[in-house]
Amino acid sequence: MIEQQIEHLKSQALEQIEHATDLNALEQVRIDVLGRKGALAQFNLGKLPPEERKLAGKALNDAKNTLESAFETRKGSFASAALNARLEREWLDLTLPAPGPRPGSLHPVTIIQNEIEDLFTSLGFAVLDGPEVETEYHNFDALNIPPEHPARDMQDTFWLSNGHLLRTHTSPVQVRGMEKLGPPLRMIAPGRVFRNEEVDASHEHTFYQLEGMMVDRNVSVAHLIYFMKTLLSAIFHREAEVRLRPGYFPFVEPGFELDIQCLICGGSGCPVCKQSGWVELLPCGLVHPNVLRTSGIDPDQWGGFAFGLGLTRLAMMRYGIDDIRLFASGDLRFLRQF
Ligand SMILES: [Zn+2]
């Protein structure tokens, strides 16, 4: 009699286990049947005669073992279903080709700098590098710009508390080149320079220049003009309209302003050329004897020319960029065009 009840309970429980929809439901069935106060625990065998008690006890044990193993099996199937679902969700095909590096591009200033470096190295010039944090001596004094000189006001910069400064031009690399290499010397020095400027479409506090210098015997303005023309026709892939005006720079004598006809407006006037049709591109000239002497070169034996090229301005001309602020903006829509 009692064995039949146990058998009945067992088959009922097996069905519930089979139909449990998740782990929580399954656990509830386990508590109801196998728990300390569950259905199996309700059978009281104590009052049965010994022979019957033995049989009922065996049936009870059988039921308990069967149900426990059914629970474990069912529980395991839930776990592997959860694992399979997760594997499906997080599936990743490791045999697919990698996405690869994101296509990038060189900054327009870098493109032009690379081209000019290639050109000048082919003409026998060395490419030199100099510090962006300069001494006052290298940025001003050694270039014939003593403390009271008005050119210092025109090149207002950022001073450091230790008396050094952010270089206002790449010209200090001339001085370092002469100190280090001595004559004869052909060098260019591209790099970043800084001015304490009111920022607008044609002025930035940070921009790029390229300094060039040649020191040799019998260097004249003709050499200067030859190299400048070679440079500009290489950059613009055509004859660029230029004009030379006398210009005053403390470190050259005579000094010139080399202007290029505005390639954005073609000379008719625009914001970049300040409506003049011309853009100052190159201060240049023959190296001032004082500058040679300061760097330990005898001006009676040696002469030289020097020029400073606005790399950023050149990039604006070449690509028709009408706002200098775009260069350091970090705007990818701008950068991806190159
Ligand atoms: Zn213009």
Image (spheres, rainbow, N blue to C red):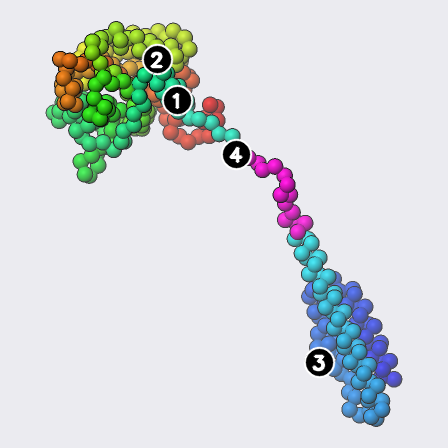
* Image location of residue 286, percent across then percent down: 21, 13
Q: Earlier in the sequence, mark 1 or mark 3?
A: 3
**Marks 1 and 2: CB-CB under 8 Å?**
no
Q: Which residue is mark 2?
A: 231
Q: Which residue is mark 1?
A: 114
Query: The disc labelled 3 sits on which kind of residue?
Result: Lys
Q: Earlier in the sequence, mark 1 or mark 2?
A: 1
Q: Which residue is mark 4?
A: 101
SS assignment at label 3: loop
* Mark-to-mark CA distance, 4 and 2: 34 Å
**Residue at point 51%, 30% (across, down):** 103
Residues shaded magenta: 87-101
Does any portion of residue 165 appear in the rendered image? Answer: yes
* Image location of residue 214, percent across then percent down: 25, 16
Residues 288 and 259: in front is: 288
* Mark-to-mark CA distance, 4 and 3: 64 Å
Residue 253 picture quarter: top left
Mark 1 crowd level (few <14, some 14–19, many ≥20, 10 Å Cα): few
Residues 112 and 332: in front is: 112
Residue 311 is a magenta residue: no
* Mark-to-mark CA distance, 1 and 2: 13 Å
**Marks 1 and 3: CB-CB under 8 Å?**
no
Q: Earlier in the sequence, mark 3 or mark 2?
A: 3
Question: Comparing marks 1 and 3, which lies closer to the viewer?
Answer: 1
**Residue at point 44%, 30% (across, down):** 331
Disc 1 under 8 Å from ligand 1? The reply is no
Mark 3 crowd level (few <14, some 14–19, many ≥20, 10 Å Cα): few
Residue 93 is a magenta residue: yes
**Marks 1 and 4: CB-CB under 8 Å?**
no
* Mark-to-mark CA distance, 1 and 4: 22 Å
